[in-house]
Image: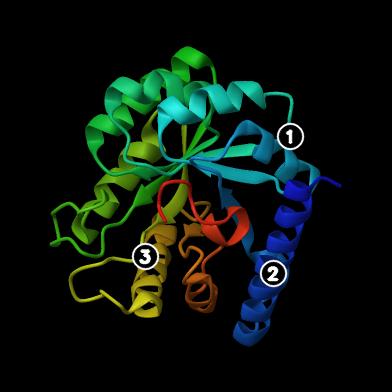
C-alpha cells in the first residue's frame, strides 16, 4: 500500500468512526448517513485511491478543476456532486459529468440545468441550497436562496425536464442568527425539509455538515455529510 493510500485509509477510518459515533448518539442507523468526500484541489489519483478504499460519492466546487478530473476517472464507479456556486455558462460542462448539483439557488439556473440535462440525455439530481444567513427572500453570502424562495425553486425543479428534485443543502452560516450555532442551523434545514416533503415526498436528501461539524449535522438528521479536510488533509495553499 502506498504512503498516500495508507494515509487516506487512516483518515477515512477516523471519519467513519466519527460518523458511526454520531449516529449512535442520535439513535440513528449508520446506513442512514452517506459520506461525500470533497475532493476539490486534490488530484485524480486521490479520487482513484478513495474509490479503491470504498468511497462512492465525491464532490467538487469548480468546474475548471472538476471536468478534467471527472474525465480522468470516468471508468471509476462514483457519484459526482457539484457543490459550488454555479454560473450558467458552466452548466453545459457540469451537466456532462455531475450526477447531483447541490447548489441550485435561482430560477435562471434551473432553466439552464434543465436545458443542459435534456441536451445531454441525462437525469440530473438537484438540491436547493438554502442560505440561513439570508433574509426571507434574499441570497446568502456563499450562495443559496433565502427560506422564502425554497418552495418556488422546488416546484420549478420538480417540473423541469431532465431534473430530479432530491432535497436540500446548506452550509453552516458565518453571519446572521445561526452563526456559530451549527446544530440549530441544521435543525432549521430539517424543518424546511419536512415542509418540502409534504409536497415532494421523494425529495428526502438533506446535505449538511463538513469536517468540523459533521456530528451536529448527523444529530440534526442530515442524510449526507460533505467531508474534505478530515479525509484528504489541509488543502494546498491554505496553510
Q: In front here: 8 or 142?
A: 8
**Residue at image point 50% right, 15% down:** 120
Q: In what element is the residue under mark 1?
A: loop
Q: Measure how far apart labels 1 and 3 are at the Cα level.
A: 33 Å
**Residue at image point 66% right, 40% down:** 46
Relative to 119, does residue 163 appear above or below in the rendering?
Answer: below
**Residue at image point 32% right, 34% down:** 86
**Total marks in image:** 3
Q: Residues within 10 Å of mark 3 (few under 14, many from 20)?
A: some
Relative to 41, does residue 75 appear above or below in the rendering?
Answer: above
Position of 123 with respect to 116 (left or right) is right
Q: In what element is the residue under mark 3?
A: helix
The reply to whether residue 161 is visible in this rendering is: no
Q: Residues within 10 Å of mark 2 (few under 14, many from 20)?
A: some
Q: In front here: 169 or 174?
A: 174
Task: Check disc 1 and report the residue beneath it.
Answer: 77
How far from the left and from the top, in percent, is residue 51? 74, 42
The label number, if any, that marks residue 170 in the structure image: none
The label number, if any, that marks residue 14 in the structure image: 2
Q: Which mark is in front, 1 or 2? A: 2
How far from the left and from the top, in percent, is residue 200? 44, 52
Instruction: Return the residue found at the far right.
Output: 1
Position of 69 with respect to 115 (left or right) is right
Relative to 216, does residue 2 appear above or below in the rendering?
Answer: above
Task: Check disc 3 and report the residue beneath it.
Answer: 195
Amino acid at each position: 500500500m502506498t504512503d498516500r493510500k495508507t494515509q487516506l485509509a487512516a483518515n477515512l477510518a477516523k471519519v467513519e468512526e466519527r460518523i458511526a459515533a454520531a449516529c449512535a448518539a442520535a439513535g440513528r442507523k449508520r446506513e442512514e448517513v452517506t459520506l461525500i468526500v470533497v475532493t476539490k484541489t486534490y488530484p485524480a489519483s486521490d479520487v482513484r485511491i478513495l474509490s479503491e478504499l470504498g468511497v462512492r460519492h465525491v464532490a467538487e466546487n469548480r468546474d475548471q478543476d472538476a471536468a478534467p478530473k471527472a474525465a480522468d476517472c470516468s471508468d471509476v464507479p462514483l457519484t459526482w456532486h457539484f457543490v459550488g456556486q454555479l454560473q450558467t455558462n458552466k452548466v453545459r460542462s457540469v451537466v456532462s459529468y455531475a450526477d447531483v448539483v447541490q447548489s441550485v439557488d435561482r430560477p435562471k439556473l434551473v432553466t439552464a440545468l434543465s436545458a443542459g440535462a435534456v441536451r445531454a440525455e441525462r437525469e440530473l439530481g438537484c438540491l436547493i441550497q438554502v442560505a440561513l444567513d439570508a433574509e426571507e427572500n434574499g441570497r446568502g453570502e456563499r450562495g443559496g436562496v433565502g427560506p422564502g424562495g425554497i418552495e418556488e425553486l422546488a416546484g420549478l425543479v420538480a417540473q423541469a425536464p431532465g431534473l430530479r428534485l432530491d432535497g436540500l443543502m446548506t452550509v453552516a452560516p458565518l453571519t446572521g442568527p445561526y452563526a456559530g450555532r451549527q446544530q440549530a442551523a441544521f435543525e432549521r434545514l430539517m424543518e424546511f425539509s419536512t415542509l418540502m416533503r409534504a409536497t415532494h415526498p421523494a425529495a428526502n436528501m438533506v446535505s449538511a455538515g463538513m469536517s468540523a461539524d459533521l456530528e451536529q449535522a448527523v444529530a440534526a438528521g442530515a442524510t449526507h455529510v460533505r467531508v474534505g479536510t478530515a479525509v484528504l488533509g489541509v488543502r494546498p495553499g491554505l496553510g
